[in-house]
Amino acid sequence: MTSGGREGAPFAAARRGTPLAPPLRTPPTSGIHPEVARRPDHNARMTDDWKRRLDALHADLVRRDDPVAWVTEADAVEASRRYPQIALRGPVFGVAARDRTAAEPGWRLLKPVVDGMPQQARDGLNSHLWFRAKDDTDDPAARRELLAAVAVLERAPADEVEALGVRYRVVRGDEFARTGDDGLEPPRPTDLEPVSPSWEDPGTAPSPDVGYVLDPDRDEGPMAGALRLGLRDFTYTGDRFPPDVRADSEWAARTHPDVVRLPVGFSVAERDGSDWTPCGSLAATPHEARRSLYEGMARVWAMLYRFDEHKKALYARAAETFRAAGRADEASVEDRLFRICRVERMVRLGPDGPEPPRPSDLDEYGPMKLHPTLHTDGTVQYDD
């Protein structure tokens, strides 16, 4: 649910709910940082690898002769012109799995890459394995192997475990948004919306992350491919990032040089002077983010922040105005401006798969026991 509070703390690496970092200025068709673009080795690679890859993407677009794909590509070109910069929010974490016995044994996302700390993703993996042991098998040996992995996650901040032939890894991504002269990029006309959008149904669309194949050659078109290739050289720079964060970022670009762009998401951001502060969780569709903003203004914030009757009525009217506009992407109330923004994420890949958390990524708490003791015969012990 979107938060109604202001989160005006200075940007800090590996923190969530903070203003977006100042944008990186990028050429309108690629997403390449200008300092990177000047490097001779980068220019050589662009002449060779980039050209081959982009030519292949363009040829595929022509071959498919798909009007929807052409319109989507035109949207991407227009977005790169109107929002030519990239604003970094910071790291996000999720879980990927690789089943060696599967027909396609590559890495796939098991849990959405949306957590603000590595330990949150580890806890999600802990619960996944515990419930698999409880509900998905009657074999004591299989249950024992799953519970052994759970025990590892309870004792230490482990970023990888293996059970029943499946490797599980906590993975790290970066979340960013495009930005231009008027702020963050809103949803595009070609972004998917629900067929029958509801303002009342509390249900949410399933995360498109789950089951997503981490394939570095998976691109939707030339513009997406250009951005992905440009992001390969992206690193954290500038004094606002601590030295260990910058060093880890540069090291990751060498050890995990490939990039996968994850499914696009949508969120609410509030303008605070020249900054935009993201608030709320990542939504699968623009309408889901709009509904979150509507609920916040109409009901939730009044309860959380104990609005008086005048302020409650003011926010309720703003909510109904926003709802009546249908697919509006901005709402204002008092001196506050909110925007539905388009959120992108990337995960780095190396020879052994997706990048795990970095040493400089912060946790606010450590591993712990999350569930009752489960015995290998399936009995749950609740009194320990």
Image (tube, rainbow, N blue to C red):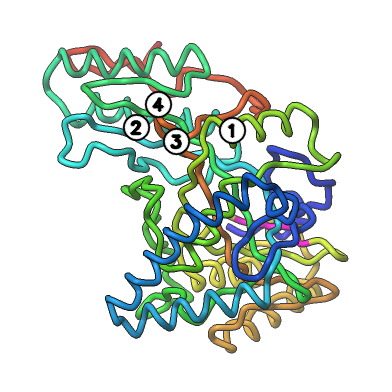
Q: Earlier in the sequence, mark 3 or mark 1?
A: 1
Picture residue at 21% right of the left edge, 12% below the top: 376
* Residue 2 lies within the magenta run: no
The residue mark sitting in front, 3 or 1, is: 1
Left or right placement of residue 129 versus residue 52 in this view = left
The residue mark sitting in front, 1 or 2, is: 1
The residue mark sitting in front, 3 or 2, is: 3
Q: Which label was assigned to residue 128? A: 2
Residue in front for this viewpoint, 182 or 120: 182
Q: Secondary structure at mark 2?
A: helix
Q: Position of residue 172 (x, y in %)?
A: 53, 37
Q: Secondary structure at mark 3?
A: strand
- Residue type, label 4: Asn
Picture residue at 44% right of the left edge, 35% below the top: 354
Q: Which label was assigned to residue 354? A: 3
Residue in front for this viewpoint, 26 or 202: 26
Q: Earlier in the sequence, mark 4 or mark 1?
A: 4
What span is colored magenta in the figure? 276-280
In the rendered image, which quarter contains the C terminus? top left
The reply to whether residue 302 is in sight is no
- Residue type, label 1: Ala
Q: Position of residue 206 (x, y in %)?
A: 37, 57
**Mark 4 and mark 2 residues within 8 Å of each other at the beta carbon:** yes
Q: Earlier in the sequence, mark 3 or mark 4?
A: 4
The residue that disc 1 covers is 252
Vertical relation: 224 (above or below) 229: below
Within the image, what quadrant is residue 166 found in?
Answer: top left
Within the image, what quadrant is residue 62 found in?
Answer: bottom left
The residue that disc 4 covers is 126
